[in-house]
Image (cartoon, grey):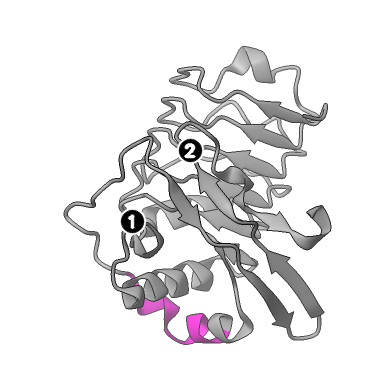
Amino acid sequence: MTMDTLALPGQDFERIPVDVLQTKAHITSLDLSYNNIKKVENIGNLTKLSTLVLDNNQLGSKNDFPSLPSLNILSVNNNNIDDLKVFIDSIKDKFPNLTHLSLLKNPACPSYYVSGTDYSDYQKYRYYVLFHLKNLKFLDISPVMADEVKEAQRQGLYSLVARPVSQDALPEEEEEHFNGLSQELTQEGKGKAGFSVSNYVYYGKQSEGNRFIMNDDL
């Protein structure tokens, strides 16, 4: 862990601790996974924050996030986010430079990678998110492709999938395997940028936020 990273997983926090963060305005990465946080607060002073991991908390769809133009990576897997429109509306203007987002194991995210539901629903979900978050390069565990961006602009506004009544959850300690992907993303006028995800194995209480790995970090 570097001096720019603060990791506080599994502390049973119900609120983000203001006393801890008051002297941490310089940090670029904050991991608060495996707590009981229902509301994001007390992070407005973290003006250099680029990575925020809030996996396995109790966050709902509506959050009053502070404006953090520096934020690039947001991981909120396995929370209580059940309204995709409300959640995306709460982040799209607050995090204008967001490039990586993961919403897996939330009711609002069709669980194709978790329980194998219809991929067409998952693709519609991706179109909707990409329509509103135009700088994304990685969504969940897959890179954003150029043709996907074009299709999202064509139909993403109308691709919101109805929320499921219930969603089967995996046992907490059950092992999940997300196979690594390696794709090239070509953006008009920007040449090629390569992104990949390592083979990811989840064993119970470990943060899921590290699934975003760019080639430069390997």
Tell me: 51 left or right of 122.
right
Q: Which residue is mark 2?
A: 203
Picture disc at residue 108: 1
For label 2, count other residues whose C-alpha is less than 10 Å away and answer few (under 14), some (14-19) or many (20+): some
Amino acid type for the residue under numbered disc 1: Ala
Helix, strand, or loop for circle 2? loop
Query: In the picture shown, does residue 212 fall above or below 171?
Result: below
Q: Residue at x 43, y 20 (%)?
A: 14
Magenta-colored span:
150-160
Residue 76 badge: none
- Binning the other alpha carbons within 10 Å of mark 1 as few (below 14), some (14 to 19) or many (20 upward) gives many
Residue most extreme to the top: 19
Magenta stretch encompasses residue 136: no
Q: Are marks 1 and 2 in contact (CB under 8 Å)?
A: no
Q: Quadrant of the N terminus?
A: top right
Main secondary-structure element of the magenta-colored stretch: helix
Cα separation, mark 1 vs mark 2, equals 23 Å
Query: Which residue is nearer to you in this view: 125 or 56?
Result: 56
**Image position, residue 179 (x, y; %):** 54, 62
From the top left corner, tell me how far across and down residue 214 is, in percent: 74, 59
> Can residue 136 be spotted in the picture?
no
The type of residue carrying mark 2 is: Tyr
Q: Is residue 190 visible?
A: yes
Task: Determine the residue positioned at 41% across, 25% down.
Answer: 36
- Provide the secondary structure element on which disc 1 rests: loop
Q: How many marks?
A: 2
Q: Is residue 105 above or below residue 124?
A: above
Nearer to us: label 1 or label 2: 2
* Residue 156 screen position, x and y as percent: 43, 78
Identify the residue at horizontal 46%, vertical 46% (top origin): 77
Q: In the displayed structure, does residue 73 sit left or right of residue 139?
A: right
